[in-house]
Amino acid sequence: MPMLEVKSLQVSLPGPRGTARALRGIDFELARGDTVGLIGESGCGKSMTALALMGLLPQGAVIDGSIRFDGQELVGLPDAALCELRGQRIGMIFQEPMTALNPLHRIGDQVAEPLRQHRGMGRTEARAEALRLLERVRLPQARQRLDAWPHQLSGGQRQRVMIAAALACGPDLLIADEPTTALDATIQGEILDLIAELVAGSGMALLLISHDLGVMARSVQRVMVMYGGSIVESGATASVFERLAHPYTRGLFGARPRLGGARGRKLATIPGRVPELIDLPDGCPFAERCGWVINACRSALPPPLPVAAGHTARCIRVDEVARSAKP
Amino acid sequence: MNFTTRARRHAGFMLGGVLVALLIATALLSFVWTPHSAVEIDIPAKLQGPSASHWLGTDSLGRDIVSLLIVGSQNSIAVGLIAVGIGMGFGVSLGLLAAARRGWVEELVMRAADFTFAFPALLSAIMLTAIYGPGLVTSTVAIGIFNIPVFARIARGAATAVWARDYVSASRACGKGPWHITFAHVLPNVASGLIVQATIQFATAILAEAALSYLGLGTQPPQPSWGRMLNEAQSMMYLAPQLAIWPGLAIALSVLGLNLMGDGLRDLLDPRLARSR
């Protein structure tokens, strides 16, 4: 049985201008030790998926479907029970290490917080464990840094602190929401390597959220491409990157900037814009921007069709797309 | 730069601090020593000018002005402390609750605050004293009640901003409940604004107490109070204008001191300024 099983997960956010369908039926599974990436542009539902898994959806959000974690249903679980899971069984790393640490608490205390909460550790014990964790994430001069304030650390160092706090209780699932977006390119690689090493060492599962194709290629075994609140393509990283089965995945690849490209060459973009989640069409969400679109695309959300072993794409014209030239 | 160094370089804060320290010292002094008794009436010695025995002279009943001023400071401080205490205690709790629970709780608290705000402070104080009878306790409670929505609004506004911060999400992701987050993250981050507001409200409370006593609704005779001194001086305005000047000056300097200190604290507690080291 997989550790995490998400079935037809739907989230809608009622707003003044109508109900936004943030997630329209997400299905995926995660086994212990799996590393899976969630990729897509802003507003496609990546972060919403993470928040739904954590039970931290914004107020008023309506959730439907099922999230089973180790056989336990998380949808509809009372907040007190979710508090037990958060930080202990599921850890999360946030995008902005600059703001995700409270400026008024010392580094050591913030790493020790989950230990005192979930493990009932005393002050000295938690402090010793926090030091061990900070050394594990290779924060330079960890011992002196225990009593440092967040503003005395650089972005990369803060992200290491965040990772230490997320790993404090040895979670089974680590959710990393754009963990390197706010960091320099050089630091980015170090942090990704650190996460990969920690995940491999502890056997926990990783759900990595990013819009960066390069980050995905080096960090995860499987990727799921999200668009308009649904997973449009899912498969082994190598297979997805090689086949680019869904037109949106192709657009995403075509739009990535490349070094050494011809001077003056215009960066390819996907025509149109991301559909508003409020007036999402019934059919394929990408239909309005897709070069392969036919009338049938607009009638219903295409089912996931097999592309290769363990690789599916929600496109009724996968075969035609596969035959055409790659970007 | 640490807090003390920066505080010493802040002229406004230092001046305010000195004035406030003077006010507190005077009130403490009144418990152990006054030049004369503040309640003893000596009609033959009424309306005297400054002299070696009565430094600032005597009032229409022959009481020593310096002694009245010194004892009167007790009142101002007591009213300020209790009124701000009531306002902060209830107001901050309600504001934090509103920010933590949102939804109808927040709506209820904030609309109640609006309702209280709809009446001018002095008017509701007068209404309360009209119902429960004039006196120090009633007027202090009335001023305190007016302080509740002031603190509730500030606490809620600041707390809502803190709740939207990433470190609160991070703390929730660590499995922390709303109470822990309120006390560990929200309260420390809104505290500086509340402290500043407390000094301002303290000054307002002193003014309000003086106004109520002046109207005869606050402190009752024979307990000395700056507001009542003003009241009694009013009928002597042409005969002895100095009687109005001294309590007026005492009120003005106390309020000025507290406001300067509040403004200074706001500068000193601003983390952006503290970081530039």
Image: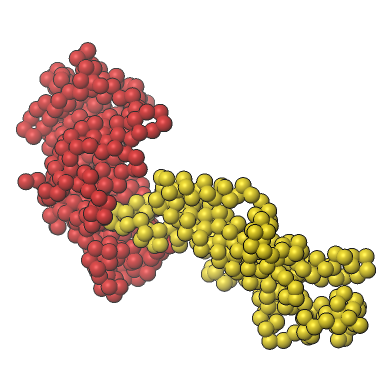
Chain colours: A red, B yellow
Q: Position of residue B15 (x, y in %)?
A: 69, 69
Work out which residue is located at the far right of the displayed protein and give it.
B239
Residue B262 placement (x, y as % from top left) = 62, 63
Rendered residue at 58%/71% (across/down)? B5
Q: Position of residue A210 (x, y in %)?
A: 27, 41
Nearer to me, A163 or B260: B260
* Relative depth, front residue between B109 and A269: B109
Quarter of the figure with residue A160: bottom left
In the foreground, B243 or A198: B243
Q: How many marks?
A: 0
> Does residue A166 appear to the left or right of B50 in the view shown?
left
Q: Residue at x 52, y 58 (%)?
A: B91
Q: Locate residue A290: give its quadrant.
A: top left
What's the residue at 18%, 43% (across, down)?
A67
Vertical relation: B226 (above or below) A102: below
Q: Is residue B53 visible?
A: yes
Q: Position of residue A277 (x, y in %)?
A: 33, 29
| Figure check: A240 above or below A137 | above
In which quadrant of the rendered image does the N terminus of chain B lie? Answer: bottom right
Side of A140 relative to A232 (left or right): right
Along the horizontal axis of the image, is B161 left or right of A250?
A: right
Residue occupying image coordinates x 93% and y 65%: B238
Left/right of residue B121 with respect to residue A272 in the rendered view: right
Please name whichever residue, B87 or A133, is drawn nearer the observer in this view of the structure: B87
Residue B190 in sight here: no
Task: Check the image and name the residue furthest to the top.
Answer: A295
